[in-house]
Image (cartoon, rainbow, N blue to C red):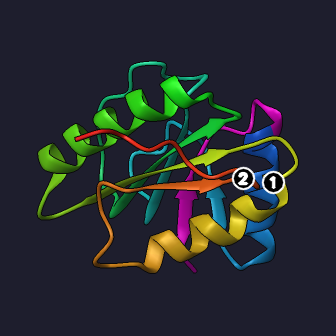
Amino acid sequence: MRSVSLSDRFPLGKIAANGLKALGWSIASATQARADLRVELLKDAPSPSLPQGEWGTFILLAAAPDRLRISELSLQVQKLAVQAAPARRVNAVAVAQGWEKDVPAVLDWLADADMVTGQIILLSGEPGPAIPL
């Protein structure tokens, strides 16, 4: 059984934990050092850093971010992905209000997406912001 380390102190964390449990994941506490998947809510870590311990995939989870926050999150995720590469993968999921039910499926998919790192998945009915080059 695959394990996920996450905090369920906030509603989005509880949705993720319950959904992943239904998909066959075992849920470990946020302080668990060893897990296949590590999920960190941005309320817990506004300026995230790579967690200690053994994990294969690290996913930042942000609830209802605005366009500026998505841009900041993109830079943070890319920086962390470079630091973690090549042994580990770092991604983020930004969740608009009303899309929370899709979080567990996206986390489950990202955990198995071996070639995906440094990316943000936006769960929303609106298009994501264009970042000018």
Q: Quadrant of the C terminus?
A: top left
Instruction: Pick whichever of labels 2 and 1 is earlier in the sequence.
Output: 1
User: Label 2 neighbourhood size at 10 Å, few (<14), some (14-19), many (20+)?
Assistant: some
Marks 2 and 1: CB-CB under 8 Å?
yes
Q: Amino acid at mark 2?
A: Ser
From the viewer's perspective, is 37 left or right of 86?
right
Q: Position of residue 48 (x, y in %)?
A: 38, 27
Q: Secondary structure at mark 1?
A: loop
* Start-end of magenta stretch: 1-11
Residue kind at label 1, given as amino acid type: Trp
Quarter-wise, where is residue 49 in the image? Answer: top left
Give the alpha-carbon distance from disc 2 to disc 1, as whole Å: 6 Å
Who's the residue at 31% across and 33% down the image? Answer: 76
Q: Residue furthest right?
A: 98
Observer-side mark, 2 or 1, equals 2
> Few, some or many C-alpha atoms within 10 Å of disc 1 (few <14, some 14-19, many ≥20)?
some
- Label disc, if present, on residue 99 of the rendered structure: 1
Give me the residue at 33% from left, 70% from top.
Answer: 116
Mark 2 secondary-structure assignment: loop
Residue nearest the observer in this picture, 55 or 33: 55
Residue 85 location, quadrant: bottom left
Mainly helix, strand or loop, the magenta region? loop
Q: Give residue 61's position: percent from left, percent from top.
A: 57, 42
Q: Is residue 113 visible?
A: yes
4 in relation to 68, above or below: below
The image's mark for residue 49 is: none
Mark carried by residue 124: 2
Q: Nearer the viewer, residue 2 or 59?
A: 59
**Direction from residue 93 to residue 54 in the image, left or right:** left
